[in-house]
């Protein structure tokens, strides 16, 4: 009788263990799926938050009286485009991507070092340098690569001084 009970109970216990293992695997898959959905939701929320902030900045920039039509060009850190130390800007900081030089007429209107400027279609830049006195209503975007700067050329655009 005891042998008969063991012979029936052992397969039932094995079956129960297999079923429990399957349930655990299924629950782990569900948890992984939920973690993935949560990560996607968090990324989406962060992207939306960033878009709202950018829209706020753009709205503020468009409503600002500091929106001008300007000529936009690009420059490189070479002496014939700068001065004797092309790696130091007029602000006395190092030149770097994401910065611009502005003409002196804009500088005199409050477009000063450290301020942010949104150039339509190109992005947001920081004022770090000044252009030669012969230019007016002009912005020069800093680029390391001379080929890219030449390819950029000369463009007419709208630029807004951001109050941030």
Image: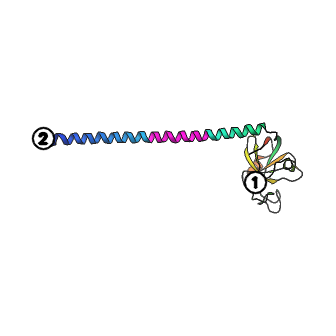
Residue 107 in the image: x percent, y percent? Answer: 84, 50
Q: Which residue is mark 2?
A: 4
- Which is more toward the observer, 68 or 110? 110
Q: Is residue 130 left or right of residue 5?
A: right
102 in relation to 121, above or below: below
Quadrant position of residue 47: top right
Residue 146 image position (x, y, % from top left): 75, 54
In terms of secondary structure, where does tag 1 sit?
A: helix
Q: Is residue 125 above or below residue 49?
A: below
**Residue farthest toward the bottom in the current orientation of the protein:** 84
73 on left or right of 54: right
What residue sits right under mark 1 in the picture?
146
Which secondary structure is most common in the magenta stretch? helix
Q: Quadrant of the C terminus?
A: top right
Q: Quadrant of residue 49?
A: top right
Q: Is residue 44 magenta?
A: yes
Left or right of residue 49: residue 15: left
Q: Which residues are magenta?
A: 32-47
- On the image, the x and y values in percent for residue 27 come to 38, 40
Dot 1 or dot 2: first in sequence order is 2
Give the Cα separation between the discs numbered 1 and 2.
88 Å
Residue occupying image coordinates x 86% and y 51%: 104
């Amino acid at each position: 009788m005891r042998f008969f009970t063991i012979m029936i109970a052992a397969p039932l216990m094995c079956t129960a263990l297999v079923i429990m293992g399957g349930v655990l695997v299924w629950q782990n898959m569900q948890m992984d799926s939920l973690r993935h959905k949560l990560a996607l939701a968090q990324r989406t929320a962060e992207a939306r938050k960033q878009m709202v902030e950018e829209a706020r900045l753009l709205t503020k920039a468009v409503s600002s009286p500091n929106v001008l039509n300007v000529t936009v060009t690009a420059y490189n850190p070479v002496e014939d485009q700068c001065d004797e130390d092309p790696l130091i800007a007029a602000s006395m900081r190092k030149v770097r991507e994401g910065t611009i030089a502005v003409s002196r007429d804009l500088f005199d209107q409050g477009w000063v070092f450290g301020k942010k400027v949104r150039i339509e279609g190109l992005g947001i830049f920081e004022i770090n340098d000044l252009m030669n006195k012969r230019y007016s209503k002009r912005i020069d975007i800093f680029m390391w690569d001379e080929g890219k700067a030449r390819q950029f050329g000369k463009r007419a655009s709208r630029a807004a001084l951001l109050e941030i």
